[in-house]
Image: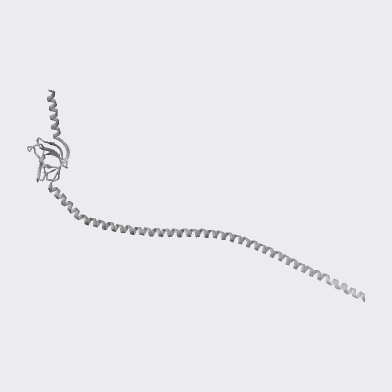
């Protein structure tokens, strides 16, 4: 009895291994249309008709019924015969892809030429911009040097102006001192002339008073001698 159960388990495992396969992508064969059915026989209704080259995701395979459970791109699931599937895209699809690729390759040189022309134009524009920026930088550097030189001159002029102001202030003070001295000397001279004039006037008055008396005494003396 135990041997029978072990044999049953081994047969069941083999059946499961045959029914469940790793999900992979396969394609409908070169037939024009393949029916996607709701079950694993022709008795089940057709869910939809699949065009040649339609990619399908194979979920499981039943080797006994020779049907595979598949899922299409929109998520719909159903069953198709395994002999209507192949691991590579249909020849018709491959040919269309090759033609599209050939057309793309034929158009590639023109696209590359246009892209190269655009890149050359952009390079020329960037070169011109770089030259303009270089010239602007040089102009700014020259302007900055001029401003620095002018600032240096302004500082020198400011220092010279302050020095001249101090010198003018000193000269003004000296002038005022000289004017004051001149005024004092003039005043002293005027006082001296005033004193001299007063002295001369007083002297003249004294002489005018004294001289007549001296003349009278001299005459009187002369008369006495006679």
Left or right: residue 217 compared with residue 65: right
Residue drawn at the location 65% of the way across and 63% of the way down: 178
Q: In which quarter of the image is the N terminus?
A: top left
Residue 122 vs 48, above or below: the answer is below
Q: In which quarter of the image is residue 108?
A: bottom left
Total labels: the figure holds 0
Looking at this view, is 159 or 56 the one in front? 56
Residue 81 seen anywhere in this rendered image of the structure:
no
Q: Which residue lies furthest to the left in this view?
A: 43
In this rendered view, identify the residue nearer to me: 194 or 173: 173
Where's residue 80, x and y in %? 11, 40
Q: Viewer-proximal residue, 70 or 29?
A: 29
Q: Position of residue 118 (x, y in %)?
A: 27, 57
Left or right, 83 with respect to 183, comes to: left
Q: Position of residue 101 (x, y in %)?
A: 18, 51
Q: Nearer the viewer, residue 47 or 136?
A: 136
Vertical placement of residue 94 versus 204, above or below: above
- Quarter of the image with the C terminus in it: bottom right
Quarter of the figure with residue 203: bottom right
Q: Which residue lies furthest to the front in this view?
A: 3
In the rendered image, the residue lying farthest to the top is 1
What residue is shown at x 33% (from left), y 58% (from top)? 127
Give the percent coordinates (x, y) of residue 65.
9, 36
Q: Is residue 178 visible?
A: yes
Q: Residue at x 85, y 71 (%)?
A: 214
Is the image coloured rainbow, by chain, by secondary structure, or in one colour?
one colour
In the rendered image, which quarter is residue 9 located in? Answer: top left
């Amino acid at each position: 009895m135990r041997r029978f159960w072990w044999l049953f388990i081994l047969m069941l495992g083999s059946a499961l291994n045959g029914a469940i396969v790793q999900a992979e992508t396969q394609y409908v064969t070169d037939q024009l249309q393949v029916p996607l059915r709701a079950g694993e026989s022709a008795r089940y209704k057709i869910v939809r008709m699949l065009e040649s080259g339609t990619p399908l995701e194979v979920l499981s395979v039943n080797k006994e019924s020779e049907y595979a459970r598949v899922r299409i791109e929109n998520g719909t699931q159903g069953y198709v015969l395994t002999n209507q599937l192949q691991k590579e895209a249909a020849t018709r699809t491959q040919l269309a892809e090759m033609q599209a690729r050939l057309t793309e390759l034929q158009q590639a040189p023109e696209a590359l030429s246009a892209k190269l022309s655009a890149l050359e134009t952009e390079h020329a524009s960037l070169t011109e911009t770089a030259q303009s920026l270089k010239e602007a930088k040089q102009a700014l550097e020259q302007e900055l040097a001029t401003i620095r030189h002018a600032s240096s001159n302004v500082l020198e002029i400011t220092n010279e102006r302050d020095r001249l102001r101090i010198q003018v202030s000193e000269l003004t003070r000296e002038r005022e001192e000289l004017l004051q001295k001149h005024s004092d000397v003039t005043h002293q001279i005027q006082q001296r002339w005033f004193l001299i004039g007063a002295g001369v006037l007083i002297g003249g008055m004294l002489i005018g008073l004294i001289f007549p008396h001296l003349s009278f005494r001299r005459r009187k003396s002369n008369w006495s001698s006679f």
